[in-house]
Image (tube, grey):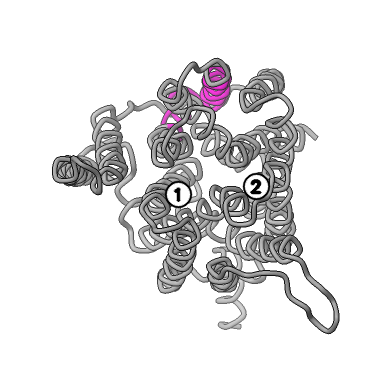
Amino acid sequence: MASYLIFATISLGLILTGITTSSISVAFPVMTTSFNASLVQSGWILSIYQLACIIIMPLAGKASDIFGKRLTVILSISMFIGGSFLCAIAPNIWSLIIFRFVQGMGGGSFFPVAMGIVAEAFPTKRQQFIGLISSIVPIGQIIGPNLGGWLVPTFGWRSLFWFNTGLAIVVLIFIVMLIKNNRREGGHIDFVGTGLLAGGLFGIFIGLSQLENAGGDQSHISLIVAIVLIVVGLILMALLMRTISRSKEPIVDWVVLRGKPFLAANIFNFILGACYVGISSFIPLYVVSLFGMSTAESGLIMTPWSIGVMIASTVTSFFLVRWGYRKPMVIGCAIIAAGLSLLAFEFKGINILGLNLSVTVLLLGLTFLLGIGLGIALPSSNNACIDLMPERVAGISGVRAMFRNIGGTFGISVSTLILNNSRSINTGFTVVYFGLAAFMLLGMPFIFRMPSQPESQARLTRAKANA
């Protein structure tokens, strides 16, 4: 019973993170107007949260080994509470972006530690319960858009952060009551590697955002600054790789980062993250801009997507041992690529066998299809390769989530640049969604570089073959 109460507590925290990301996407057009900011400036409200998650995720797994999972998860939720409170009172867009970074540090550190806690609570059913986590987050993503669609027009966008603060306090209370101290393994945190990772990512993504000004009066200066920032960022990332390969206790384990199956999983999660965020972050803006829908209606459009993820990931989790890892990822990728391609077309209502289907109905069906695809792919992408080093679940999960968030930040940055510099918003979304569909298909070959099935099932298969 204690294990299930712990899982319920972790699930409530994961639901909170789902609400946080999806509700902000619905409020994004309103926040842009409220601060009279450009699309690229406002894009940092989304991407800074992703960047914070990227930086903190590999550290969180290591910190949980040094300080214990209980203390680490308490600090994580406390930081999220502080960041949410500050976001609620932010006086301008730049302070909001800074406070979103604090919130992201708290939210991002929660995920890998949560995975480690769940793995310890269910040692014999690790694959199923880690897979089930993929069906928990979408519950928050169902609540988030609809909650945002109600709160933002009624109480303003700041009410979302007040809600986050209150719910996070409830999660913290349950964690303090239920999560017990665990064994500490010792070690130290690689602050040099952390600094290189943060500096490299900020250089690259600030450089990308600076390209917005390349078409203005100071186009040459902006272009030079952008190139310099991107080059500096890439140099810092190269130094990070060198540091990781030589350090005894690096920010990221070299084997988990560069071992062939792990490298394939990391690249695949980078691509999946770019497409995942492209769907969840921009569909509200897409339907508001192209179809003139309200904030509440844009939240409704996202609901089938979350339902699809929840249903498909739950079913896939229970059958993961039987199906293996590769088939769900291939099928999920194909569905996501098809759905994104359909979004790229500017469509209207259609008549099928005398049944009139409005644009709203078509969008609801299309987002549900995208959710099904993502829900099929997520449990496998979360579990693949963990069987190779099961004692490092938190660290592997942190690296995997880090790459998914790097992909998401990359997707946000490139998409906002395309939308901001296109002749029209319609043309911009066509390029964005066709590009994401092609990018998703590029992830297919990496699936076949990962283990095809869980290690337990692989042993059973080999035993049957030798019998």
Write down the quadrant of residue 114 in the picture. top right
Residue 328 shown in magenta: no
Q: Position of residue 196 (x, y in %)?
A: 24, 35
Q: Quadrant of residue 351?
A: bottom right
Rendering coords of residue 270 (x, y %): 42, 55
Determine which of the numbered discs, if any, sits on residue 408 in the image. 1
Q: Position of residue 407 (x, y in %)?
A: 41, 52
Verify CB contact (< 8 Å) between mark 2 and mark 1: no
Q: Residue at the location (24% across, 44% down)?
A: 216
Q: Which mark is residue 133?
A: 2
Report the residue at 58% width, 71% height from top. Answer: 342
Q: Is residue 319 above or below residue 413?
A: below
Location of the C terminus (image quadrant): bottom right
Residue type at mark 2: give it.
Ile
Please name the amino acid that badge 1 sits on: Gly
User: For the residue labelled by badge 1, is the local secondary structure a helix, a strand or a loop?
Assistant: helix
Vertical arrangement, residue 22 with respect to residue 333, above or below: above
Decide which of 412, 30 is in the foreground and name it: 30
Callout 2: SS: helix
Residue 146 seen? yes
**Residue 459 in sight here:** no
- Cα distance between the residues tagged 2 and 1: 19 Å
